[in-house]
Image (spheres, rainbow, N blue to C red):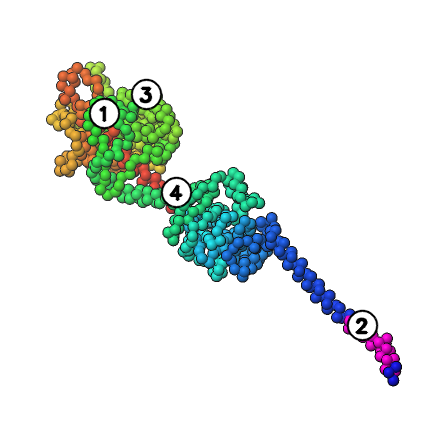
Amino acid sequence: MADTTASKHLASISGGNIITDMKNLSSLLKTRRTVTFAYGFMFAFVAFTIFLAFSPSPNSSSPWFTNIFSTSTSTASDSHRSQFSSIFSYFLPNNTSAATSQEQGRGFSSMPSQNTTRSNNTLSPTSRTEVKDPISVKNLTQSTVLQPNRTSNSSVVIKEPAFASNLTQTAVNSGKGQVLKPNQTTVANPTTIQVAANQSENTPTKSGSLVKDGSGNQDKGDAGKTVSSNFTGDAGKTVSSNFTAPLVKKQSNATKQSNETISGKELKQGFDNRVQNLANCDFFDGEWVKDDSYPLYKPGSCSLIDEQFNCIINGRPDKDYQKYKWKPKGCTLPRLNPRHMLDMLRGKRLVFVGDSLNRNMWESLVCILKGSVKDQSKVFEVNGRHHFRGEASYSFLFKDYNCTIDFFVSPFLVQEWEMHEKDGSMKETLRLDLVGRSSSQYKSADIIVFNTGHWWTHDKTSKGKDYYQEGNHVYNELNVLEAFRKALTTWARWVDANVDPKKSLVFFRGYSASHFSGGQWNSGGQCDSEAEPIKNVTYLRQYPPKMLVLEKVLRNMKTHVTYLNVTQMTDYRKDGHPSVYRKQNLSPEERKSPLHFQDCSHWCLPGVPDAWNEILYANLLVNEKQKQQAQKRHR
């Protein structure tokens, strides 16, 4: 029985049961092999991970395993999240996510910057430092490079200007994972940082990128020396920062340029507003005020001043008469800027036409402008003259500006004439119907300043007997005011017919007051005792009737003529004449009675005519502004 049972069992083993058991054993072996392979792979992975962790990749742009075991206060979860953020940014470089890459210890990762700006700092849970960039920088690309010896509890937030555009600025709190707002105020311990101002994370410096060698030292190359700078943040704590000098200089220059641009715009706007106010201002209703910044040029510095006007050289001891400026009641008269005026006159011709008072004004302007030119040899009288009396005309060339300032002698604006008498003698007359002989030489000038007046007070003109002529007719007697009106009418018709108002500006300077006391210029009139201006308007004289005639003629002209009504403003200045200081070398007769030969009609230079030129300058400013506005309207 037992043998039978054993035989059956053996049969089952050697038969189908054995085959089934072998299949089950094969399935079991497969499962164990899989588990063994899995354990082996995990062991190899862990070993490889440890190897990479302690031997980081030299490729600073790789997002993989970058010194993950270096000293840091970040939690494991923060580090894990940061690594995945870096990997995500590596594959999607245009992403503007708030996640930022880690830059810690000796090795650091620099992501490609593509229209994205980041603050690559992991913030300590205990402290944060806030650094403000200059507010004038726009479209700022800002990165912070951490030093190898950075402390574990310090971090930096770069605070950007509120108006900066195309800017992504974030900071991650490693303890809480909190993103700071751009304007958030933070407090930090002193932190050493390396700031590359106005640079993206991989932007080279002036001479190349900032790099670190294997030891963690910065390779400065030609980038310049590192300087230490202390500044105080919003929290009131001092932060010590190391800046690469050229980068700081570049940022400083950019800030300076931006500030200068803003400042320049503000100055220009203020200047434009002042010019606009001048357009509605009566320049001639005002007063003389003391100003120690005057005169406009140093006394005795201009060799061009005629001896007749050079009071300092002639020995005048007092200087206060040079320290007054004219102040209109309704506006502030701008101080004459000689370089700016020369710029306005560039390529142009300014002409003074009239008597010796206009020569006074012409010499004043030449001296003011000449003093601003560095190379004085490039300012000269075109005919080589050094004395400016006795010739019919003079012309000063400012070579660098290609402009000339000329003077034409024409005391009446009409022609002085001679006619033959029956006995063969010559009779002097004044042709009221003929404009001055030199008129054709200046009719095309860009700016023309006319005057006449003083010569109409001389004996012949004031008496008017056998002196005034029209055609072939000589008046036996003609009232001086009527003769003056006829002469100005002749002048006005010539201006209307010959001067192009689209090209030329025309001015007429009014009568300049004289201050002879006890006589006239040829009869012992004096003014040498005057040292101060008249301050009470009640002591001024009546407005000259000749100037009323002039105003009427000007109103009837087709051409616009700007009237420089200097009569009242000069009437205040009884102190400004040469008086006895009109020349150095006196004649024998003058030495006997020097006080009887005084000049109380012309003006010392520097002096009153400088103010006339400031008013001329103000008028040119107004005209230039009006032209600019007209051009804008026609666009």
Label ID, residue 385: 3
Q: Closest to the observer: 373 or 380?
A: 373
Q: Nearer the viewer, mark 4 or mark 1?
A: 4
> What residue is pinned by disc 2?
22
Q: Residue furthest bottom?
A: 1
Label ID, residue 260: 4
Label ID, residue 236: none
**Magenta span of residues:** 4-25
Residues at badges 4 and 3 in contact (C-beta under 8 Å)? no
Which of pointers 3 and 1 lies earlier in the amino acid sequence? 1
Give the Cα separation between the discs numbered 4 and 1: 41 Å
**Camera sees residue 167:** no
Which of pointers 2 and 3 lies earlier in the amino acid sequence? 2
Disc 1 crowd rating (10 Å Cα; few below 14, some 14-19, many 20+) is some
Q: Closest to the observer: 179 or 71?
A: 71
Task: Residue 388: say if magenta.
Answer: no
Q: Amino acid at mark 1?
A: Ile
Q: Residue at x 57, y 55 (%)?
A: 68
